[in-house]
Image (tube, rainbow, N blue to C red):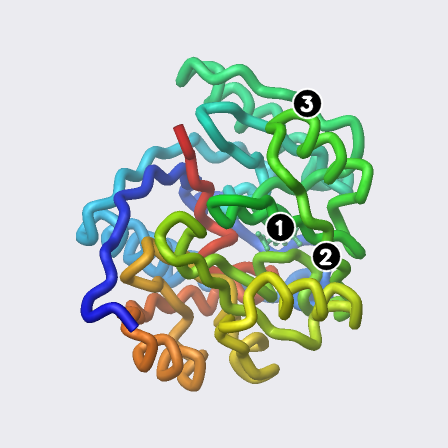
């Protein structure tokens, strides 16, 4: 194990939770009309942003749109690599208008946006390992979209089947700890995946960090890692201990209000890889 892991500065796009609410149910975490403590949600979200900034990361913001309560979950809006942007096409009608709002931001920032032809929920289901795109399917993003992503970026896309509705997006069940060029490892909750997909993950990452169901239900896999610091839900204590044993530095950030909508740290964070 390296003595000290080296962080890489990241560029993030986020969306303030001004209109955040739970108004419809498109995953098992959501109960329509669950009261959300708006003030607490804003404070938790601001703490996440301040924590990123304090660790040297760049944070940019897209303006929230009234009537789009899930727009705070920036990760779902796109997948970016090599300065190129593959946009989103949401499965749920309620979220579809978010794509245009994010696309406008990317265009203003001089990125062209490729439109998916099939349902694709951005980094919710697509994770860059430094070598492959790990791609979830089963609940949201389709295998057709995986093929579009492979064609667009010219990078190998590895499809993984999610089987537990509580872990409906790949980023609720897996995250990249360190990119392949820098050592390369992931953390995941095996039972969120089909047997064949579990086998694929075990072959690719025999030394992966395996999380318990408890960690996963605490949104412990909805992490952002810079290769050294892992911004992690404070409820995932066993996972945080494992990460610390491997030389990572867990940085707890509590987004409990967002769990009511089925989201956490990673869901609120779109990475721009330019
Ligand atoms: N309510 C949102 C949905 O179900 C939550 C999205 C969470 N985002 C994520 N990257 N997992 O679509």
Residue at point 49%, 61% (across, down): 264
| Mark found first going from the N terminus, 3 or 2 | 3
Across and down, in percent, residue 102 comes to 53, 28
Is there CB contact under 8 Å for labels 2 and 1?
yes
- When asked about the image quadrant of residue 14, the answer is top left
Q: How many marks?
A: 3
Quarter of the picture holding the N terminus: bottom left
Instruction: Tell me: is circle 2 under 8 Å from ligand 1.
Output: no
Across and down, in percent, residue 136 comes to 69, 53
Q: Residues within 10 Å of mark 2 (few under 14, many from 20)?
A: many
The numbered dot on residue 115 is 3
Q: Residues within 10 Å of mark 1 (few under 14, many from 20)?
A: many
Say which element carries label 3: loop
Is there CB contact under 8 Å for labels 3 and 1?
no
Across and down, in percent, residue 20 comes to 52, 49
Position of 70 with respect to 241 (left or right) is: right
Across and down, in percent, residue 135 comes to 67, 49
| Mark found first going from the N terminus, 2 or 1 | 1
Instruction: Tell me: is circle 1 under 8 Å from ligand 1.
Output: no
- In the picture of the structure, the residue carrying the numbered disc 2 is 160
Using the image, determine if residue 140 lies above or below residue 111: below
Position of 120 with respect to 242 (left or right) is: right
- In the picture of the structure, the residue carrying the numbered disc 1 is 134
Residue 69 can be seen in this image = no
How far apart marks 3 and 2 lie (CA) works out to 22 Å
How far apart marks 3 and 1 lie (CA) works out to 19 Å
Quarter of the picture holding the C terminus: top left
Q: Residues within 10 Å of mark 3 (few under 14, many from 20)?
A: some
How far apart marks 2 and 1 lie (CA) works out to 7 Å
Using the image, determine if residue 26 lies above or below residue 109: below
């Amino acid at each position: 194990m390296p003595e000290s892991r080296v962080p890489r500065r990241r560029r993030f796009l986020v969306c303030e939770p001004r209109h955040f609410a739970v108004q419809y149910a498109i995953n098992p975490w959501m109960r329509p009309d669950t009261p959300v403590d708006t003030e607490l949600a804003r404070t938790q979200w601001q703490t996440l942003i301040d924590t990123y900034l304090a660790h040297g990361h760049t944070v940019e913001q897209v303006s929230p749109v009234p009537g789009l309560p899930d727009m705070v979950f920036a990760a779902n809006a796109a997948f970016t690599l090599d300065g190129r942007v593959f946009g989103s096409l949401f499965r749920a009608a309620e979220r579809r208008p978010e794509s245009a709002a994010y696309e406008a931001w990317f265009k203003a920032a001089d990125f062209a946006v490729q439109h998916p032809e099939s349902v694709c929920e951005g980094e919710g289901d697509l994770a860059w390992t430094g070598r492959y795109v790990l791609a979830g399917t089963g609940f949201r993003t389709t295998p057709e979209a995986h093929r579009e992503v492979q064609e667009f970026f010219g990078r190998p896309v590895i499809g993984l089947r999610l089987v537990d509705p509580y872990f409906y997006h790949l980023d609720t069940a897996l995250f990249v700890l360190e990119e392949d060029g820098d050592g390369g490892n992931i953390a995941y909750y095996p039972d969120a995946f089909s047997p064949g997909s579990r086998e694929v993950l075990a072959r690719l990452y025999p030394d992966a960090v395996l999380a318990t169901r408890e960690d996963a239900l605490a949104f412990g896999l909805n992490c952002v890692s810079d290769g050294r610091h892992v911004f992690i839900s404070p409820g995932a204590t066993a996972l945080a201990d494992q990460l610390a044993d491997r030389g990572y530095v867990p940085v707890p950030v509590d987004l409990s209000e967002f769990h009511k909508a089925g989201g956490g740290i990673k869901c609120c964070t779109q990475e721009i890889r330019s």
